Image (cartoon, rainbow, N blue to C red):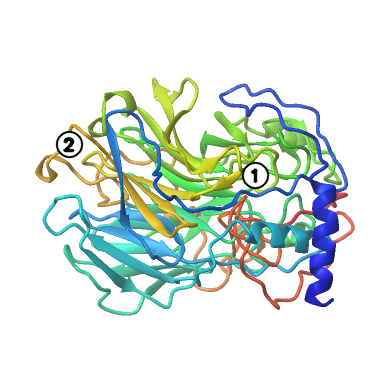
Amino acid sequence: MRYPAYLAIASVLGVLAACGPEAIEPQFGPNPELPEPKRGLLPNMIIAKPMEWGDDEPIVPEGYSVTAIATDLNIPRQTLILPNGDILVAEGRGGYAPALKPKDVVAGYIKGMGTTSVPSGNRLTLLRDEDDDGVFELKTVFAENLDAPYGLAYIDGRIYVANQDELVWFEYEDGQTKASGEPQSLTPLPSKINHHWTKAMTASADGRYLYVGIGSNSNITERGMTAEEDRAVVWQVDVETGMHRIYASGLRNPTALTIQPGTGQLWAVVNERDEIGPDAVPDYLTAVQEGGFYGWPYSYWGSHIDDRVRPQDPEKVKSAITPDYALGSHVAALGVDFSNANVGESFAEGVFVGMHGSWNRKPPVGYKVVFVPFKDGAPAGEPIDFLSGFLDEESQRTRGRPVGVTVDPRGAVIVADDLTNTIWRITPDAGLAPRSEVTAEPEAGAGQGEPEPGTAAPSTIEQSGEEPAPGGGTAESSAGQSESGEGTGTQGAEGDNPDATTDEPATPEPEPATPQPTTTEPTTQ
């Protein structure tokens, strides 16, 4: 099919998509209202197109200021604060998933209208404030020629990077501005198809393990269950050996991971399934239980069955864990990090969540950073806008798309924006804590904190070395994942980047017994 024909299909189907059901108010909290599934020819495919800031700037709460500390990056996704206060930025875009149907081509075209046109950086950039005046004078490439780097972690003199196909590491000395050698491989990561390509990552509080989020290869198994082996899971990886195992499953696209201070509990934000209405299914924030199953593909929000998946698995549905906190449908949460007291009293206990923004909801939602307050170690109350003003509701255009969120131990909040290719820094007007008075968070200097609950002995973890075998149960493990949910021929994350195409062959036809949905989905991330 020639390109003009694609545009013709896009214009016709785009009109049809705009006739989809209207959305209700977003659902937040532990007990969201879940409407009946609404399925049509197409979902609403509406993305907020880019616009300039002009004289405007992002909105922050009273008593805080926001500054663009780095611009002209090449698709910044996640950030890491190093022990000396330098900021490392992962830049890139990945995915190989081919389109399954014309609808997928249309979705990729529409999502592409809401993404940056700059090429994938495939690198790490280091930012440094030389004199602690809030101006990051140094912006330099720390490492390059990576493959869509996304997740970052620091443990005892090593920087770990989750590429879309491999977990690698660099030796690091305090103050270093450039990698001293080539990246060293710890373990391959699932990467076939890579509908959801991003590999979220965080370090356990004791520094023994890395947790890696690996998204599904489809919306609801359109490519068959064979393509979903070692997908929609969180891996636990031994940092010494690279041995790994599935820590939790049924998480459609875990796009960001973080460790709760003081408890060592793993938390995640997850992008849920599409094409059953503008208000289903809510993306969510949840504690990740060891051995837990969270529903995908058979059910959502606990035991709500997705009848597009055949055959069903009643026992799996019965075991499905209900997430802790709904963030709203299609907001495309791509960043999460716990706050600390230095951020300020009103935001001292809870998590910040970066919302990349929807591509399939009318009106659009997300496009901001919110704070979810905690009480007694769990989410409590409605989310509070912390960094907003990106989305112009009247024109339904956006000035940016937040991705990763990182909290500086001194009290600053760092936000990556992959539409304007900017790093934003939000600081309390009362000032930051002195560097000498703070200690690095687990990701930025492991070996601290309490041991991770439920960690596994190395003997229970699968040895790395070759591509993991399907299901993560053998010494030859398999590979792959995505950001907010990219996937069709264009790349992005669930509601994220649709930018990469591929000639990679489609996966094998599913066996007759594998679940087969009645619809397909355009990938996102």
Which residue, given by chain and number where applicable, does mark 2 sit on?
Answer: 431
Q: Which mark is residue 250?
A: 1
Quarter of image, res 82: bottom left
Between 452 and 106, the residue placed more toward the observer is 106
Between 62 and 204, the residue placed more toward the observer is 62
Q: Amino acid at mark 1?
A: Gly
- Helix, strand or loop at label 1? It is loop
Q: Amino acid at mark 2?
A: Gly
Residue 18 in view: yes
Q: Which mark is residue 471?
A: none
Between 139 and 520, the residue placed more toward the observer is 139
Q: Earlier in the sequence, mark 1 or mark 2?
A: 1
Q: Is residue 372 above or below residue 90?
A: above
Residue at 27% across, 44% down: 408
Q: Position of residue 351 (x, y in %)?
A: 40, 34
Residue placed farthest to the front in the image?
Answer: 55
Residue at 85% across, 40% down: 39
- Helix, strand or loop at label 2? It is loop
Q: Is residue 291 left or right of residue 335?
A: right
Q: Is residue 298 left or right of residue 283?
A: right
